[in-house]
Image (cartoon, rainbow, N blue to C red):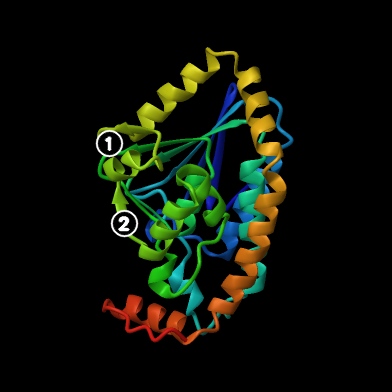
């Protein structure tokens, strides 16, 4: 059904697998479109009560596909991409399931936004989480501003976004970005155990609580998604973004000039 994802269901548990392992599950326009459609379809699935998200291969997701951003043979439609990204964030936040992110390897950029949009984040000790849009002169998208400040507060969110630091799982747990740690290699089994524990709980009441707490925040998320889209489209046209992309490809430190 999908080219870049796998959706597997077993009883009341569904697993959504990002499936571009050759590219560390970096997200091109096709994956973003499929992810938006997949999450929106799950909003109508009353048979599923827990959704687990993970990445195939050696990472959760390296974020947006930078190679796709600079491919001269396939012009990058930032306006269209931002629509997919906003749909992903809004669908994820309003899902009528308990969502669990299982993080191994890297969860960077948009991948990090998606992780933080989940109800429960389980990460391996040496996984790496990074809201690192700043490294290529961009702002967080996918609701990254919203999800991060919901977890750590506005002041800390600004610091983390501006710094763009890679946090290992243990550091991320200390500041509240990660809920549960596992040993390296045991993240997925830990996430599955957590999911089965949820199913032995009065999970309908838990889902109702999620809906109650999220309902009043949906308009705020929509506003932030609109502002992220406007800002990202503007940032794509800056000299700093071009320098950041070129430095990334050339594996050197960027020289930003604030323009």
Q: Which mark is residue 185?
A: 1
Q: In this view, does 141 lie above or below 168?
A: below
Label 2 CA crowd tier, 10 Å (few <14, some 14–19, many 20+): some
Q: In which quarter of the image is residue 46?
A: top right
Q: Residue 173 location in percent, x, y?
A: 34, 39
Q: In which quarter of the image is residue 187?
A: top left
Q: Residue at left 26%, top 79%? A: 252
Q: In this view, does 254 lie above or below 45?
A: below
Q: Residue at left 65%, top 37%? A: 214
Residue 48 visible in the snapshot? no
Q: Is residue 212 above or below residue 247?
A: above
Q: Which of 121 and 11 is in front in this view?
A: 121
Whole-angstrom CA distance, mark 2 to mark 1, is: 20 Å
Residue 107 visible in the snapshot? yes
Q: Do the residues labelled 2 and 1 touch (CB within 8 Å)?
A: no
Label 1 CA crowd tier, 10 Å (few <14, some 14–19, many 20+): some
Q: Residue 235 location in percent, x, y?
A: 54, 77
Of helix, strand and loop, which one carries label 1?
Answer: loop
Q: Quadrant of residue 22?
A: bottom left
How many numbered badges does the structure rendering display? 2
Of helix, strand and loop, which one carries label 2?
Answer: strand
Q: Is residue 224 above or below residue 75?
A: above
Q: Residue at left 32%, top 84%? A: 255
Q: Residue furthest front?
A: 155
| Residue identified by numbered label 2 | 166
Q: Residue 86 location in percent, x, y?
A: 64, 57
């Amino acid at each position: 059904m999908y080219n870049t994802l796998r959706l597997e269901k077993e009883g009341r548990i569904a697993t959504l697998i990002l499936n571009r392992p050759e590219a560390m599950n970096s997200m091109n326009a096709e994956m973003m479109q499929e992810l938006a459609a997949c999450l929106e379809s799950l909003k109508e699935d009353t048979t599923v009560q827990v959704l687990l998200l993970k990445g195939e291969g050696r990472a959760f997701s390296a974020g947006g596909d930078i190679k796709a951003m600079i491919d001269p043979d396939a012009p990058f439609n930032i306006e269209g991409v931002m629509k997919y990204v906003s749909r992903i964030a809004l669908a994820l936040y309003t899902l009528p399931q308990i969502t669990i992110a299982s993080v191994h390897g890297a969860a960077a950029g948009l991948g990090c936004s998606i992780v933080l949009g989940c109800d429960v984040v389980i990460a391996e000790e040496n996984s790496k989480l990074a809201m690192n849009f700043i490294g290529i002169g961009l702002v967080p998208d996918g609701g990254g501003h919203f999800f991060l400040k919901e977890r750590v507060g506005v002041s800390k969110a600004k610091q983390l976004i501006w710094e763009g630091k890679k946090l290992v799982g243990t550091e991320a747990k200390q500041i509240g970005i990660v809920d549960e740690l596992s040993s390296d290699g045991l993240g997925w089994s830990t996430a599955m155990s957590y999911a089965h524990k949820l199913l032995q709980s009065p999970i309908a009441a838990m889902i109702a609580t999620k809906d109650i707490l999220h309902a009043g925040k949906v308009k705020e998320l929509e506003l932030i998604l609109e502002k992220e889209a406007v800002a990202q489209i503007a940032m794509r046209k800056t000299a700093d973004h071009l320098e950041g992309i070129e430095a990334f490809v050339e594996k050197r430190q960027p020289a930003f000039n604030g323009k």
